[in-house]
Amino acid sequence: MSTHKLLLSAKNLCVDYSYHGLTIPIVQDFNLNIHEGETIAISGESGSGKSVSALSLMGLTGFYPGMSARGQVVIDGVNMLEENETAWANIRGKFISIVFQQALSALNPVLTIGNQLKEAIQIHQPDLSSQDIIIKAKALLNETGLTETDRMLRSYPHELSGGQLQRIVIAMAIAHKPKIIIADEATSSLDEQTATEIIALLKRIQAKNGTALIIISHDFRQLTDVCDRLLIIHQGKVTDEISSDQIRSGNMTELSKAYILADQLLTKRNALGQGVDTLLKIENLSKSYKKSALTFWKKPNIIKALQNISFTVSSGEILGIMGPSGSGKSTIAKIISGLIDASDGQIIFEDRPLSKKDLEENKLLRKSIQMVAQDALSSMNPSMTIGEQWMEVLLFHKIAKSKTEACTIIDQKKKEFDLPEDTKSKYPVQLSGGQLQRAALMKNLLLNPKLVIFDESLSALDRPNQVRMINLIKDLQAKTQFSGIFISHDPLLIQSISHRYFTLENGMIITQNNC
């Protein structure tokens, strides 16, 4: 039991989501005591309730339509769930702060970093002079490791890297030296080195200010060395709580071991044999963007997202593309799948040139190239059941001639994807993260594509579910022989599923490897 001051106590915390007449429990009987200077890690698969738990600790669930919290969140003897929004606003940023997953989405694209830091400072210090605000903003940037403070303050979010943006939102979060900082998947979109640096930064801030840290992540490798306690959440419930001593000694339940030791189940894949036909050929692919200046007398900036990229994908092969955030990985995926045009270069698919226009106009060609999105929930229609969405795909593309035939195909495929019998009748929000990703993948593979692009498709899943998905993809590929492009910043995932891979940095290929 901690001897440090108790800062916050969550007791029997429940969060429900009302949708289509259904009440769906998202968090169930969540209990947590947070002490000064403590680091608590919360892990579990996507959709398990990790982030919603964090939102409820800050009184933010009411901002989401259909979501409601009950139970207790006790701060200084007061149950904040019984207080109004004014009471919450007085402690957000000052007592408890949050660092969100997508720094770019958390920032205003039309305001400079300086103006946004100014807002973060003024909210609890409205009487500070402009000069004092600038001094404090620069000090916060320095504290987070950003030394070019003048350039940072006059920059817009799109002009900075993912790592720089994450440091900036941390600077905003620590502006008033809060007692508790929640890092909600704050490193999941970053490459391994940058993610390690961000965790180290949060620990330095903790050591300096005595802050309590709640680190939410599905990546156990980040958590086991930095936390005092680790909570595992599954389907809205805390199923396991492990101390740092238990992690080091291995004295854990079988469930905890399955999570923490899952990395050992990822093994390297051998390269494909010689003499295999080429399905896809990319020649000197380039993509540039014009970023308009916000003043008319300045020339627009030219951003080179891709520079002279060339590679091939053979029939039955999965090619991995690895690199840090912002390196151009997703740009390649969008060009090949026809979402955007290339600025230069050529795409050859099955010995014929391929363009965005071809994919828009040719339904058969569009069916042959499928992309599995990073966020499975966003790729599904929230107002249709999973079964209705599968059936729509089969009927629209005339793979099934009738609803009866479509149902037969769905029932056969569902077994291959290890999905429960009642999956067809459920809405996307009712599935766990792992189930939802398998349902989304099944939706893609019902089309019998020749090329499947996985764009960070497993990054939101915990490691056990990632292992499960990797094995499923390998099994399905062995049966249907589809080719794939697997995009990730995780080297373990890349090497376990790819026959070979290359590393991208600043829009250029810097290394090529067989697995």
Image (cartoon, rainbow, N blue to C red):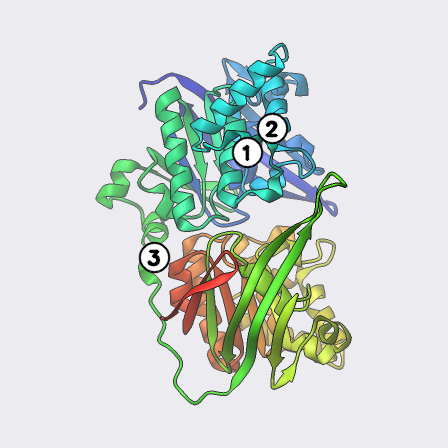
Residue at left offset 67%, top offset 58%: 380
Q: Which residue is mark 2?
A: 114
Q: Are there few (<14), some (14-19), or many (20+) residues within 10 Å of tag 1? A: many
Q: CA distance from mark 1 to mark 2?
A: 7 Å
Establish if 304 lies above or below 75: below
The type of residue carrying mark 3 is Asp
Q: Which mark is residue 22?
A: none
Q: Residue furthest left?
A: 249
Establish if 463 lies above or below 413: above
Q: Where in the figure is residue 211, as x and y percent of width and height?
A: 41, 23
- Would residue 206 be visible to someone looking at this image? yes
Q: Which residue is mark 3?
A: 263
Q: Quadrant of residue 468?
A: bottom left
Establish if 449 lies above or below 127: below
Q: CA distance from mark 2 to mark 3?
A: 41 Å
Q: In the figure, is residue 394 to the left or right of 165?
A: right
Q: Mark 2 or 3, which is nearer the eye?
A: 2
Q: Earlier in the sequence, mark 1 or mark 2?
A: 2
Q: In the figure, is residue 500 to the left or right of 172?
A: left
Q: Which residue is mark 1?
A: 152
